[in-house]
Image (spheres, grey):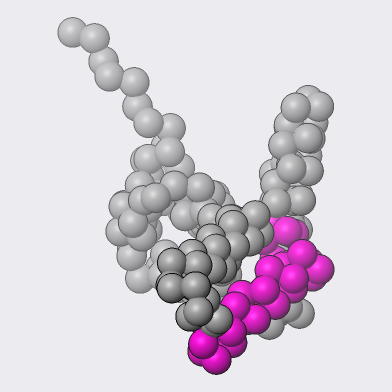
């Protein structure tokens, strides 16, 4: 009878006493998968409460959001909203194609959001730069540098998040 290969990321292979490794794996799974916190906790061999403490203390939700929502996506979303307002106005009878004060205000706010996204460096920009740098190291055969850099990258991103608040 052939044995099924074991998943190397289960709690037994990690060893229950190795909290740092468990936390690193949990962090990676939280940021890079759509698994629930309960699923991640079970996979790495910790309680959901422990994982929740790590998520809160490390501000993992903010990091996940910054990875999932990119500047181009936001700009596109705001431009689509602006376009929709313009379409609504254009569909009116010719004499009524003037935006209302509320529409004018909304259009100005959307335009300002797009402009600010074009100017300022956001947390998502820092996340993308760090991800690209780590991918560069991996492709350059410098995989041994990734593990020691990960805590520093996370600390850097958290400090940037605090500054940008």
Image quadrant in which you'd find residue 116:
bottom right
Main SS of the magenta part reads: helix
Q: Is residue 14 magenta?
A: no
Relative to 24, does residue 78 appear above or below in the rendering? below
In x, y percent, where is residue 33?
44, 47
The magenta-colored residue range is 100-127
Q: Judge by depth and name the residue closer to the eye, 10 or 104.
A: 104
In x, y percent, where is residue 123?
70, 66
Image quadrant in which you'd find residue 13:
top left
Q: Judge by depth and name the residue closer to the eye, 132 or 9.
A: 132
Q: Judge by depth and name the residue closer to the eye, 111 or 72.
A: 111
Q: Residue at coordinates 72% horizontally, 37% vertically from top-left?
A: 135
| Residue 14 visible somewhere in the drawing | yes
Q: Residue at coordinates 34% horizontally, 21% vertically from top-left?
A: 5
User: Please, which residue is most extreme toward the front here?
Assistant: 95
User: Please, which residue is most extreme toward the bottom here?
Assistant: 101
In x, y percent, where is residue 65?
54, 63
In x, y percent, where is residue 93?
43, 73
Q: Is residue 117 magenta?
A: yes
Q: Judge by depth and name the residue closer to the eye, 73 or 55.
A: 73
Image quadrant in which you'd find residue 8:
top left
Q: Residue at coordinates 27% horizontally, 19% vertically from top-left?
A: 4
């Amino acid at each position: 009878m052939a044995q099924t290969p074991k998943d190397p990321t289960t709690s037994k292979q990690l060893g229950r006493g190795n909290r740092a490794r468990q936390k690193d794996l949990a962090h990676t799974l939280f940021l890079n998968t759509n698994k629930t916190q309960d699923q991640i906790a079970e996979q790495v061999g910790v309680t959901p409460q422990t994982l929740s403490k790590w998520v809160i203390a490390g501000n993992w939700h903010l990091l996940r959001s910054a990875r999932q929502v990119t500047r181009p996506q936001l700009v596109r979303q705001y431009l689509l909203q602006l376009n929709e307002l313009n379409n609504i106005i254009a569909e009116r009878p010719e004499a009524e194609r003037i935006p209302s004060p509320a529409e004018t205000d909304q259009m100005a706010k959307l335009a300002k959001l797009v402009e600010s996204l074009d100017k300022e460096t956001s947390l998502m920009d820092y996340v993308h730069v760090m991800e690209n740098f780590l991918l560069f190291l991996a492709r350059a055969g410098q995989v041994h540098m990734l593990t020691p850099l990960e805590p520093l990258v996370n600390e850097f991103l958290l400090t940037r998040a605090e500054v940008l608040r």
